[in-house]
Amino acid sequence: MARRLGREDLKARFRAASPGILPSLLACDFAHLEREVRKVEAAGVPALHLDVMDGHFVPNISIGVPIVKAVRQITELPLDVHLMISEPAKYVEPFRLAGADSMTIHIEAVPEPRPLLDKIRSFGALAGLALNPPTPLSAIEASLPHCDVVLVMSVMPGFGGQKFDDVALGKLRALAGRSSSYAGLEVDGGVGPETVGPCAEAGAEMFVAGTAIFKSEDSADAIHRLRADAQAATQAI
């Protein structure tokens, strides 16, 4: 396995990949995990997105430290780990040790996130902060200087395949002008052929897509099409 990138190198890699399509492994075929990873890896994605759910913060249970560790062993791609859990402070170090390169926590779970964001960064990982559709931007305003990634949720977290909530577009527009210090302004939930363009126009730089990729007939083709649509929308601005 190659040497893991430092924080600044990771930030530069994410910025250079914009618009970047991040496959969400939640939607993949876990019976053939390595095969699924290889397919999207070959499509040139900048990172993989892994959703961690605890059945408490969100009404679903997904993967944990062992799966992140397993994915780390089969790919050199950065791992963007989305912690949809109630007590992320207990787990950021284990996930970092397992191979997480970027870890995103939720403002709804950690109302005063600065200490935990700083802790994540002290481990050498990118620190992200997410907010759900009903949560106003004012909730994260004070924490923005301590974020490497800001993740705007366009669905309520917990399950894949949900319908995109347009409230995310207004938040992306408001955040886009402040993103010069970020590794990326990310959007997650219902991202597909009909929504990736509007998200790009609104300022999103990284696009998390699960169902649109892994439930398509050709995941690599789906990634290329999503990236092309995002690029076209960005160039049209």
Image: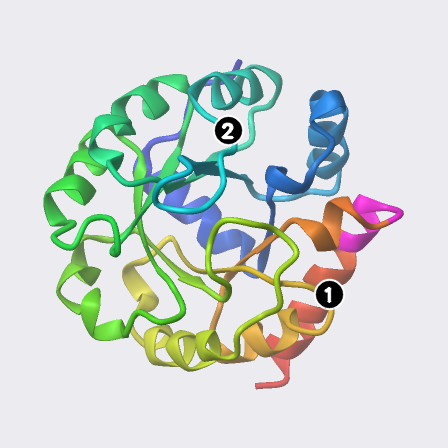
Q: Amino acid at mark 1?
A: Ala
Amino acid carrying label 2: it is: Ile
- Give how far across and how far down residue 45 sits, in percent: 64, 44
Q: Is residue 33 above or below residue 143?
A: above
Q: Position of residue 48 (x, y in %)?
A: 56, 38
Residue drawn at 55 percent across, 60 percent down: 189
Which residue, given by chain and number where applicable, does mark 2 sit on?
A: 63
Q: Is residue 115 above or below residue 207?
A: above
Query: SS class of the residue under badge 1?
Result: helix
Q: The magenta stretch spans which residues?
A: 217-222
Which image quarter: residue 55?
A: top left
Question: What kind of secondary structure does the magenta stretch mostly adopt?
Answer: helix
Q: What x and y, as percent, mark residue 78?
A: 49, 34
Q: Going by the image, does 45 lie left or right of 193?
A: left
For the residue pair 130 and 127, the one nearer the viewer reads as: 130
Q: Is residue 224 above or below residue 99?
A: below
